[in-house]
Amino acid sequence: MEVRVHEPAEIATDPEAFERFYREHVEAVQRFVARRVDDPYLAADLTADVFVSAIESARSYRRSRGAPAAWLFGIARNVVADERRRNAKELRTSARLRGRELVAEDDLAALCERIDGESAARGLYRRLSELPPGERAVLELVALDGLSAGEAGRALGIGGIAARVRLHRARRRLQSGLDLPGLGTNDLPEVTT
Amino acid sequence: MSNFEDRLLVELRNMVEREPVERGRRLPRRRFALAGGLAAVAAAAAIAGVLVLSAGTQAAYAVTKNADGTVTVEIDSITDAAGLQAKLQAAGVNAVVEYLPEGKMCAQPWFTPAGAAAHGMRQSGVERTNDGTTRFTISGDQPAGATLVVTTQTGPGGEQALGIGWAQGTVPPCQVVDAPAGSGPLGGPPAG
């Protein structure tokens, strides 16, 4: 993935640094979200949540967590997973900023177009729900979002080796007959150690 | 960029300008928004977050006074509201803890949300640990008249949500009413 160097630690205190960071990543974050949800208003909420969460956790950024973009994907994954967990329990989202309130009618076409473009990825995302959460997290970032196993491990704060182990287990689980129609093991990247 | 992206940028920039994160602290959360019944108060209220708690855990809560004067609150299960409230009071935190049975809510508006004063109440982000504990830390120097509000509601499936926020002045007694018919567990429309 594309790697640029802006220190995320600054985005919580410096509006200019935040704007640069936002412009650099907003499209990638929206695509990330569109690979997981198909409702444009929910996608807007989650996009806002991801950046709020990034601002809140910016000070915890370390280079060891990987490139800023991978770090942001780690945050985004948690934000979407939290939303999913709430939906499963019929609870509404919490937010400092409601992204959907910023959506005008004119925006819907672009939001929907992005969502439509990621329908195949959403199918894969749904099928991964049978995996244990730890394995799922790694596989999501690798298979859906194009991170390497090492990047995914750093983004999730578990390290590259643990990520590769989980990826390996996930692949084996899938091969051993977990019912994931349409997801051949060819869809999963090879694990290299 | 589309208009949505521009508007979001403006909001987020404002957030950074308004509340630069102090080194070593997370942003104080000031509100959360829920649909329906609770939304009326929650949109304006200084409620910090809503979290899902797992049912059936045993230990209820822990309140710890830290060496630096802050108070860390950990909630393991939504039981013994009176006990938690007493513990918070004993730790110097003026608090109201109100846990509600399934299908019920406090009549809205329930309390006056702490507005600008909330900036003075340093509260860490509410986090949920891997073992299902909800944890947050508040500073010992709250402004006079501020009351921490911890409230929860239980949905039809037994799922529980925890809201944490700040009220200005005293918090009137909760008038327990039925959550609106056909609503979700928090009084809003069913989750779609």
Image (cartoon, coloured by chain):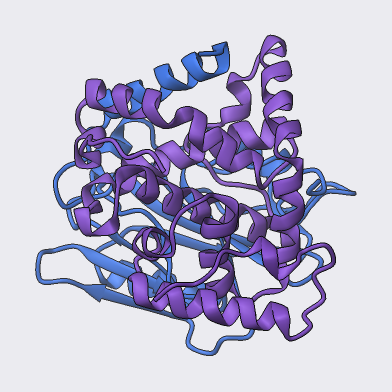
Chain colours: A purple, B blue
| Residue at figure coordinates x 77%, y 80% from the top left | A178
| Residue at figure coordinates x 52%, y 41% from the top left | A95
Depicted A115 relative to depicted B192: above or below: above
Image spot of residue B144 (x, y percent) = 24, 45
**Picture quarter containing residue A34?**
top right
Depicted B173 relative to depicted A102: above or below: below
Left/right placement of residue B13 relative to residue A27 reads left
Image spot of residue A103 (x, y percent) = 63, 19
Left/right placement of residue A45 relative to residue B18 reads right
Image spot of residue A176 (x, y percent) = 73, 86
- In this view, the residue in front, A173 or B132, is A173
Does residue A89 appear anywhere in the picture?
A: no
Image spot of residue A182 (x, y percent) = 82, 62
Left/right placement of residue A184 relative to residue A63 reads right
Tag count in the figure? 0
The C terminus of chain A appears in which quarter of the rendering?
Answer: bottom left
Q: In the orientation shown, which residue stands out farthest toward the right?
A: B182
| Residue at figure coordinates x 33%, y 71% from the top left | A159
**Picture quarter containing residue B61?**
bottom left
